[in-house]
Every structure is written in C-alpha cells, then in structure tokens.
Image (cartoon, rainbow, N blue to C red):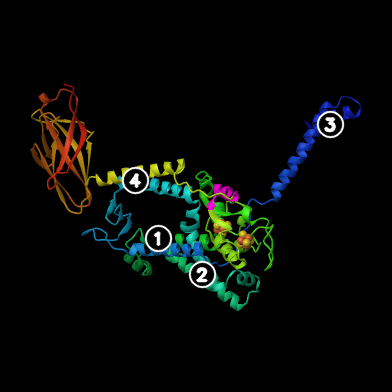
Amino acid sequence: MRAACALAQLWAAAGGRDKLAGRCRLSEVVEVESVQSRQEQRSSPLYQGRVEVYAKAVHGRFRTIKWVGLAIMLGIYYLAPWLRFDRGPNVPDQAILVDMAGRRLYFFWIEIWPQEVYYLTGLLIIASFALFFATALFGRIWCGFACPQTVWTDLFMAVERRIEGDRNERMRFDRQPWTAAKWQKRITKHAVWFLIAFLTGGAWIMYFNDAPTVVVDFFTGQASAVVYFFTFLFTATTYVLAGISREQVCTYMCPWPRIQAALVDQDTMAVTYEAWRGEPRGKHKKGESWEGRGDCVDCKQCVSVCPTGIDIRDGFQLECIGCGLCIDACNDVMAKVGRPPNLINYDSERNQEIKAKGETPVYPLVRARTMLYVGVLVLTAAVMAGTYLMRATTELTVIPERNPLFVTMADGSIRNGFDVRILNKAHEDRSYTLTLGDDAPAHSLGTPAGDMGDALTLVAPADDVTTHRVFVRVPPESLTASSTPITMVLTEIATGEERRISTVFRGPEP
Ligand code: SF4
Ligand code: SF4
C-alpha cells in the first residue's frame, strides 16, 4: 500500500489524476491519528494510583445510624460463634456452626445435611431478592450501611482518627518528617488494625469449628494447618481491604455498583444534591442577602467528610456509596448559615424535578420492579418454609446389585441383592420395618445372615447413614418379565413415618 501511495503521489505531482493520492493522504491522516491515539493510550496508565482520602469526622443522623449499625453487626459477627444451643448428646452445641467434618450446617434448631444443599440455594435467592428490593427502594443502602467493606473500613478509619487525628491533623501528619513520635503513632495504628483484622479472621474460623476448642488449640499450637492458614488469610484480607484499599474496593473491585444500576429507577432514593436549590453557589458573608443566589456556600464540607473523596454536587457518581455523611455535614453548615436543612438530601430523582417545580414529592412503594422482587421473595420463602416443615427425618436410598443382576437359587427361586441406605437425621437410634409394596410379586426378604420373611427389621444409628445388604427372593412362576417394578417401603416403628422408593427386580427372560 505504501509503494502504491508513493507511485500515486508521483503521478499526481506530474499532473495526473490524484484520486488515489487523495485516498493515500486520507489514510496517512488516519494512520497519524491512530499512532497518536496509541501513544496517548501508552502514556495514560491502566491503573489510577490511589489519591489518599482524608475523610473528616462528622456528626449527625446518618453518622449515628452508621455507628449503631456497625456496633450491632460487628457484635453479632464476633459473638455469634460463642452462642450455645443444646441439641442433645453427641451433637455439637454451637448455635451457628458449619461442621465440615460432620458434613452438617447448624443454625440453632435448623440442621442442613449435604443432601439438602438446595436450602442454601433458596437462602441465596432470598438474600439476593431482599437486596434487590432494598436497592430498588433505598438505592445503595447496602453499600453505605451494611456491606462488610464499609463497616470494617469505618472501624479502621475511626481507629486512624483516634491515633493520628482528624482530617487536617492527618494531612499535616503525613507531610511531617519521620520522627520518633511519627513512627510511634504509625506503628500503633497498624498494630491496632492488625489486631482487629486478626480478631476478624479468627472469628470467621470459629464458624467452622467449635469456638472454645479452636481458640485453645490455636494458641497452644494444636490447631490444624487449615485453621492457621485461613486465619492468616482472613486477617490479611481484612487488613488490606479495610486499612489500605478502602474506597478502591468499592470503585474498582466490587461488581455490585455496576449491577445495581439495573435495579434502580427514577423513584429510588439516593443521596442527592438539590441543585435547583443550591445553585448558583458561592461564598456567603454573614448578613449578606440570599436573594438571587443558591443556598450552597461552597464550603466543601460535603467533600471533606466523604469517605470516597467525591463531590456529590457533581451529580450521581459510581463512587458514591450512599452513606449520607455529606447530608450530615451539609445540614451542619445550613444550620450555621441559617438556611433550611437537606440541601443534600436522601430523595429520588423524580422528587428533585417535582420539588424544583414547587410541588409535593411522591414516594410510590408499589412499583412494577418492587412488586416483582417481593413476589419472588415471598414465593421462595414460602416454598422453603413448606419444604422445611414437611421435610422427613429419614431418607431412603436403594441401589440394586448389578453384578450379578440376579442369582438362581438351589430351589429355583430368583434372588436379587440391594444396598438399602438409611439416613437417620434424628438424634436417637431408630428401628424400621422394611417391606415391599402391594405391587410386588410373591416374595421373601432377607439379609446375608438369613432371616427370610415378609418384613425385615433394620436399625439405623442416630445422626448417621447406614447401609444394609438386603435380598429379595421371588419364585420363578411369579415373574412375568425379566424386569419387574417393585416398591420398597421403610416404616419407622415408633412414629409410623414411612419412606417409599421404586426400584426393579431382575430375573431371567420368562
Ligand atoms: S457523596 Fe455523600 S453519600 Fe456519597 S459516598 Fe460521599 S459522603 Fe457518602
Ligand atoms: S456542605 Fe453544603 S453548602 Fe457546603 S459545599 Fe457542600 S453542598 Fe455546599
């Protein structure tokens, strides 16, 4: 192409038609532009380095809600593994426990076996739709108040303020040379952060082990390598995410801000600057008129307190976690300058337009999307509650022997072997009667020990799975096909609880 262009341009210079030369000039322009764009791409980094956010302490309604929420959530997280719940002998008495060795999940009186993992799926669906519903109504309420990243970052920032001071002090502190006092404060801060991170990682491990036992084992060096590994892992992640990465987790790592954009509408509540009221902004001196100007005095207090370091007056932003601290800060300012509160407000986009026109705001809770989320939520909860209440405490599995399919006995009868597996979820041993349903041909039942008869008595130990080898014998004249459907019926002797399972009896071609 370059050679063709050179020839065309020579031809054009010699007075010939320059259509191809024109195209070549165009392609050169495009090429130059694309080279420039590639150079720009190379010079702009893929990763934006973190700009330190010195969030200022603030007091107010939202800050109080956040402190109360933080205390409740952290209290539950750290203390829950220590709660005891009596389930009887030989069963863990920890109220909330994921017992990996015993392959069981305990939540107070609820016990989930591995076979019932669909309950966890149901719980995840309920949790997801509850979150969708809350997001449709209240925007980023999860991010601002309940997300572990926010809660632990808040705690770490509180520690930082306590040790290194508030915003201005910390900015000065960071610029100071490294004196002994600076080292001491910095090391203290990181030590407290590390302690919180360690308690957090340690508490997580307690949900998977008996809490008092694992604590003793941990400090006497008798805990398993898995316990030490995961404690270290969760300590490190808490320390890095809440202490170092902070708002970058929300902005760059978490997918939720992107997903929730699809869950909100014009009526979703969000932290919003009421530009119709605040603009034109500007400094205001005491005694000056408010005529012809907005209420925003451009003090930037809303920016100073923001944990993600953004200016909410620039409109909705991905970085805004909806914590409401800028509302508290601005209300403080409005009170000082004698203007009405809530220049930064927790309200919907629609209400901004309505209020700008001087009309009454609306708060429609019943919307297509909220009803859809509630519908799925209620339906899933109902199905789960129903299946849990009707759940059997015995599970029966029957596996026919395949090698050989059948045995012809000395008396000519045909015998099939089956593995009858009984899962007894009760905390006491149980006795069962095993029979065949009415659809079965004439038969007798037995075990490798003999005991042939119409019914077998089988015992299943508490809280365990037992497999019994069972034989079914059928006289050849009772068989009309090589494969006869039969039903095995297991009846718990004490309660009469019955489990049925269909299988087949194999025999020779009649
Ligand atoms: S802009 Fe306001 S609501 Fe959003 S993160 Fe910052 S302080 Fe929180
Ligand atoms: S705190 Fe309020 S008055 Fe101050 S800059 Fe922010 S919006 Fe304006």
Identify the residue under disc 3: 6
Q: Are marks 1 and 3 in contact (CB under 8 Å)?
A: no
Identify the residue under disc 4: 381
Q: State the CA–CA distance, disc 4 to disc 1.
A: 27 Å
Does any atom of ligand 1 lie closer than 8 Å to the CB of label 3?
A: no
Amino acid beneath label 4:
Ala
- Secondary structure found at label 3: helix
Look at the magenta stretch and give its main secondary structure.
helix
Callout in the foreground (1, 3): 1
Of the numbered discs 1 and 3, the one sitting upstream in the chain is 3
Identify the residue under disc 1: 204
Of the numbered discs 4 and 1, the one sitting upstream in the chain is 1
Callout in the foreground (3, 4): 4
- Which residues are drawn in magenta? 347-357
Q: Can residue 254 be seen in this view?
A: no
Of the numbered discs 3 and 2, the one sitting upstream in the chain is 3
Does any atom of ligand 1 lie closer than 8 Å to the CB of label 4?
A: no
Q: State the CA–CA distance, disc 2 to disc 4.
A: 40 Å
Classed neighbour count for the residue bearing mark 1: other residues with Cα under 10 Å, few (<14), some (14–19), many (≥20): some
Q: State the CA–CA distance, disc 1 to disc 3.
A: 71 Å
- Secondary structure found at label 1: helix
Q: State the CA–CA distance, disc 3 to disc 4.
A: 74 Å
- Secondary structure found at label 4: helix
Amino acid beneath label 2:
Val
Give me the disc on residue 159: 2
